[in-house]
Image (spheres, rainbow, N blue to C red):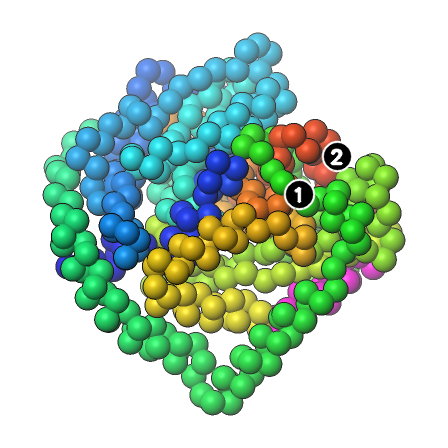
Amino acid sequence: MISAMDQMNSTDVSFLNIENDFNHMHIAAVAVFEGPTPAGDEIERMIASKLDEIPRYRQKLQFVPFDLGRPIWTDDAHFDLSYHVRHTALPSPGKDEQLRTLVGRVMSQRLDRSRPLWETWVVEGLEGERWALISKSHHCMVDGVSGADLLAVMLDAVSDADPPSSTSDWKPERPPSKASLLMDSFTEGIRKPAAGFDNLRRLIGTPRRALRELADLSDALSTFRTSPSLELESALNGPIGPHRRWCHGSMTFTDIKKIRKRHGGTVNDVVLAAVAHGFQTLLQSRGVPTRDRFVRTLVPVSIRRDEEKGQMNNRVATVFAELPIGLDDPAERLAAVRAEMDSLKEHHQSEVSELFGAITEFTPPVLLAAVSRMLANLDQQTIQTVTTNVPGPRHTLYAAGRRLAAVYPYVPLCGSIRIGVAIFSYAGTIHIGITGDYETTADIDVLRVGIEAGIDALLSVS
């Protein structure tokens, strides 16, 4: 019988199904360390010592014939760590711009589905005696929160940690046969609806709450009645190619706290206000009018419960926020973002999204696959970008005794969204990673500069 821990959930499957030649559905973290690059196979030995704590790193996908069931994770009998850990170096002088170019190229390549869906690149030669790890995993395996947990497991909490142990008694389990997969999928098809309805009852609870959920669904859909201008849509939406650009920046929690003390709001509100300023700057540099306009962004929200901590899968809902790019006053922009996010919370938009997720859990796999692939190819103009915000470790981490100085995230692009913004907090700093379609976002750094300037603008107003 297939274990629930080995079978992909519907969200995982969706990320797998929407991948094609242009939608590369991997997420990543670019971790920059201080000090000399570890010698020889030191990083491989560090990762090898953690593999027993990360079973998914030695597992690959096994598909059910004819899409009659959801794929499962099975041990890779031919697992080869050296395939997944790769080494490269930047040419002198090893500037950040060269790192950005390398990350864009690494992210332009799909992961091999015949192997475990992850890679780690050891990058030598960053100026200032620094080096980096580019950790790339398929989104069907992890979401942002589980990726942050993975980072904390992989690295050390102290600089003088014991040398990694190379001993492990791991032996791959034999994968199930196609016949047993089909039989288990048939059994699962009978059991799953009952479990799905139990989950729906948990989410809806009472008839009164069910009515509220319907009202909230209506409110959530009503946000799509208005759309940005056609000129703005054509500037940010459209077909994407297989290649990527990437750039990175940062802001400090000290500055965020100063802004919150003066103007109120959450950390997320402040960051989104800065992102709004960044898009205003980008669009104005392209000659696109922004007055009285907004950019609609998809914002993933973690719904991971305490008992699910440490699991490698996706537990996210989504909300859709309108970033007020038409406001020039920084304080007014932040106030508008606060009002928008408070409204989304009031109408429980993330809970509505979770409800949809519960429904898809007992949607037939063939239908789920068809719908996912259709959505991946849909030329929609109602959403201009995606903005993820993941809290990372608050304490300093180390690899082979070297201090982790910064962690810059990478978010994938999909459909007609040409730009995505990812935010990751670590040890008192908020790091930003911006993904762009290579052919249409040569000016992606304008957005980064605009986001950082948005923080400076908020600091400058009393």
Relative placement, left or right, of 240 versus 157 is right
Q: Where is residue 185 in the image (x, y as percent from the top left)?
A: 22, 60
Residue highlighted by disc 1: 238
Mark 2 Cα-neighbour bin, 10 Å: few <14, some 14–19, many ≥20: some
Q: Does the segment drawn in magenta span residue 267?
A: no
Of residue 185 and residue 163, the one placed in the foreground of this image is: 185
Mark 1 Cα-neighbour bin, 10 Å: few <14, some 14–19, many ≥20: some
Q: Which amino acid does label 1 sit on?
A: Gly
Secondary element at image label 1 = loop
Relative placement, left or right, of 241 versus 81 is right
Of residue 221 and residue 67, the one placed in the foreground of this image is: 67
Which residues make up the magenta segment? 330-347
Mark 2 vs mark 1: which is more N-terminal? 1
Q: Position of residue 7 (x, y in %)?
A: 27, 55
Residue highlighted by disc 2: 446
Q: Quadrant of the N terminus?
A: bottom left
